[in-house]
Image (cartoon, grey):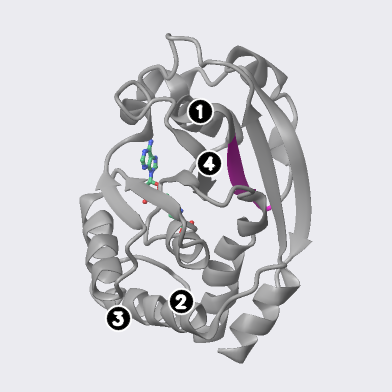
Amino acid sequence: MNFLIENAKKLKICLSQKQAELLMEYKNAVLEQNRTMNLTAITDEKDFIIKHILDSLSGVPFIDKQEGKLIDVGCGGGFPSVPIAIALPNISVTAIDSTAKKVNFINNAVSKLKINNICAETARAEDLGRGQMRGTFDFATARAVANLHILLELVTPLLKIGGKFIAYKANDSETVDLHRALSVLNCKINKIVNLNLPNGDERCLIVIEKTDETPNSYPRQNSTIKNKPL
Ligand code: SAM
């Protein structure tokens, strides 16, 4: 647990003992469930702390409001959404994934651990972006879900104007040629931050700000987004 607290500090995140305990308990829940359901290929405990927990927490400093709503698109086994919810109890987190069994696992695990500021839903981002959740989030995150060209169209319709999308990437290579997508979707790159995880892995957080309403024609149908990315 000290390893987690010390390394979180290096990422400028101050975890209480209770928060660190909850993070470790969530790790145990994922690894336990992973025996019967494919949630992660990372089963070594230290690797898990680095590659799932600390990596997820690396986005926390960019959630620069005391209170607000965050959506994690393609949350899988709860990353980065669950560590963020534990680290920021005043942020209300919605974790969505198109796979119901992953969503059910998250809801059961957070309910047992009494993490009350997160709720998981089975949904596709592009459907939510055309529904009642459109334009309602202050922050969004996505890790290991799709290329940035595709993610921008899936995620930014869900943000309020001024809302920020924190994309977890290995590097900034996907920002090349992003100009058209940013312009069509009324967004701009707010900052790009490179960092190293304790094992030396390079990570890149790309923060994208929504500057105006998303045009009504976006997001398009899933097949169009994939076949004709902006
Ligand atoms: N974010 C998690 C992580 O980093 O461990 C999971 C990553 S997993 C490789 C990608 C997840 O995104 C899958 O669980 C998949 O079901 C989900 N996904 C892909 N496209 C999606 C969409 N359009 N809407 C919602 N979920 C989606």
Query: Where residue 91 sits: x, y (%)?
Result: 47, 53
Compare residues 103 and 66 and report the one nearer the observer: 66
Mark 4 or 3, nearer chain start: 3
Mark 3 or 2, nearer chain start: 2
Helix or strand or loop: what does disc 4 sit on?
Answer: strand
Q: Amino acid at mark 2?
A: Leu
Q: Which residues are magenta?
A: 164-170
Pointer 1 with pointer 3, Cβ within 8 A? no
Q: Amino acid at mark 4?
A: Phe
User: Where, by quadrant of the figure, is residue 38 drawn?
Assistant: bottom left
* Residue picked out by circle 1: 160
Label annotation for residue 139: 4
Q: Is residue 1 left or right of residue 136?
A: right
Please name which of the two marks, 1 or 3, marks the residue nearer to the observer: 1
Query: Where residue 228 sits: x, y (%)?
Result: 50, 17
> Residue at left 37%, top 62%?
77
Query: How far is the residue under mark 4 from the one under mark 2?
Result: 21 Å
**Quadrant in which the C terminus is drawn:** top right
